[in-house]
Structures are given as structure tokens and as C-alpha cells.
Image (cartoon, helix red, strand yellow):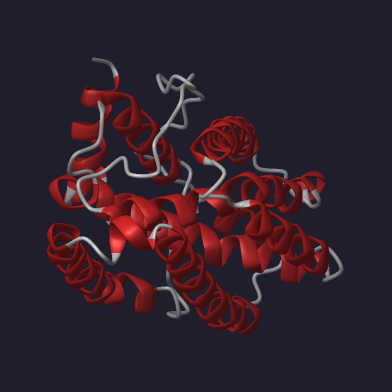
Amino acid sequence: MLNDVNTITVRQTQFKPEKIKAHYTESTLMSHFLTALSMSFPQGERFFVETVRNVRNQIHDEQLQKDISGFIGQEAHHARAHEQFNQLVQSNDYHLKNFEKAYEQEMIRLRTLSQRRQLAATVALEHFTAMMAGYMLEYPNIMFKGLSENMKNLWLWHAVEEIEHKHVAFDVYQQVFANLAQRRRSMRTITVGFISSTIVMTSHLVWQDRKNTLYSPKQVLKNTQTLLGLTQMMWRLLPDYLAFYKASFHPSEIDQQDLLIKAKALLVR
């Protein structure tokens, strides 16, 4: 099934690599949460591209081939931008290197799986990123509160493009494998891994920054509100998450068009 509404545009990000503080939102917890997500992006998105390229020669649909090219272009830019961010946010007392090594080992493991299982993992993770991207665009006052224009450019640009190409890996999987049982199994596995790893990484970053995050009464209040907000996000996204398990599911059935139109208008400013 092709996505008739979204077009996939490979854009240059307006994000400018520069020195970034560990606290770039009003809530230190939100900063650490977003940084934990960013840590996974460079290696993860390169893996996504590989899994689609592995079977691209089996796709004979002309429009899907064009969409694959857009998907690859967007993901390549995302990986580079977040790699720059990850390098710049590190300091002597705030470091991500151990997590990057852990992700590298996980990517090595995933590459030992069959092409079907690799692509199914990509499909599941792309669903997570599309859900969260939509949430960021729908609730920017929660997710982006206190962000500089430069950091907004990074996250807004990434969110828009994740939604634009959310159908690509799914459509490739359906055309090449169309194995519902594998899709469901992979989503169950990815759910446990994605949520647990994000919690663990965020917790480690919070502990590294405990002086500012845990010992400041002002930040404890803000971070409690952030924690409640993230919990609310999980509940709000639950229907979209569960929809993935339907035999008839397609990413385009989750309507994010109004969010996308508004966000694209902000991108060109």
C-alpha cells in the first residue's frame, strides 16, 4: 500500500552544530530523555537503511522505489545530525560513550539475524519513532519547553521526516515477506528492548547529572511533572501502539496530516 498523501523530502537540517549544554530544556529530565533517544539514532538509523537495502532489489513498484530513495536520504541525514549532537553534548562529567558501545554490540547481534527478522525489527522501531514524532508535534509545549531555536530545529525536522517516511519499511516488508506472525513477534521483542533501554539510559544520564537533576528542589518539581507527562504519553499512544498488531494495519491509518502541515510551515521559517 502506498502513502498517497505524504511526500518524502530530503532536507538539510537547520540545526547548527555548536556547543550544547546537557540541560537544553526547562526540565533536566526531559533533556536526559531526549539525549537518551538521540544516542540510539546514528547506529539505529543506519541499520534501518541496511535492512531496506538488503531486499530493495525485490521491490518492483516504481513509487515504492522512489520512497525508498527518500527514506534512505532522510535517515542518512538524521544519523549525521544526531551523531554531531551526541558528540557535542558530551563532557568530562556527562558522557555517552559506554552506551554507544552497547548499541554497537546490539547492532552486531541484529545483523546476524535473517533479513526478514532484521526488516521486521526496523518496521517495529519505525512505528515507535513515528508515534513519538507525532506526539512531539502534537504536544510541543510538553516535549520542547525551553528549547532554543537551534534545538527545536533538530527535533522538529527529525519528527517531520519520520512521519513522512513512516510507511516505507512497512511497505517493503509487506511486499517482500508479508509475515504477520514475525511482525507481531518483532514488535513484542522491540517493545521490551526499546522501553527498557531508554529507561536505563535516561536513568544513567540522570545519575551522572544528579547534582542538578535530583538535588535541586526546583528541578525535582519540574522533573516530577515531566515524569508524569512521559507516563501520560505512553497511555495516549497505547491505541496507536496496539493498532500495529492488527492484520490489516498500515501506518497511514494513523492520521498525522494536520500535525505535519503545521510542522512543515514552521520548518521553512
Residue 34 rendering spot, x and y as whole percentages = 39, 52
Residue at the spot x=54%, y=41% of the render?
Answer: 91
Residue 141 rendering spot, x and y as whole percentages = 13, 46
Residue at the spot x=62%, y=60% of the render?
Answer: 122
Residue at the spot x=65%, y=68% of the render?
Answer: 120
Q: Which of 179/85 is in front?
A: 85
**Residue 247 seen by the camera:** yes
Placement of the C terminus among the 4 image quadrants: top left
Residue extending furthest right? 112
Residue extending furthest top? 269
Q: Quadrant of residue 206?
A: bottom left
Residue 192 rendering spot, x and y as whole percentages = 53, 81
Q: Does residue 237 appear to the left or right of 59 in the view shown? A: left
Q: Does residue 45 appear to the left or right of 226 in the view shown? A: right
Q: Which of 211/112 is in front?
A: 211
Q: Which of 47/249 is in front?
A: 47
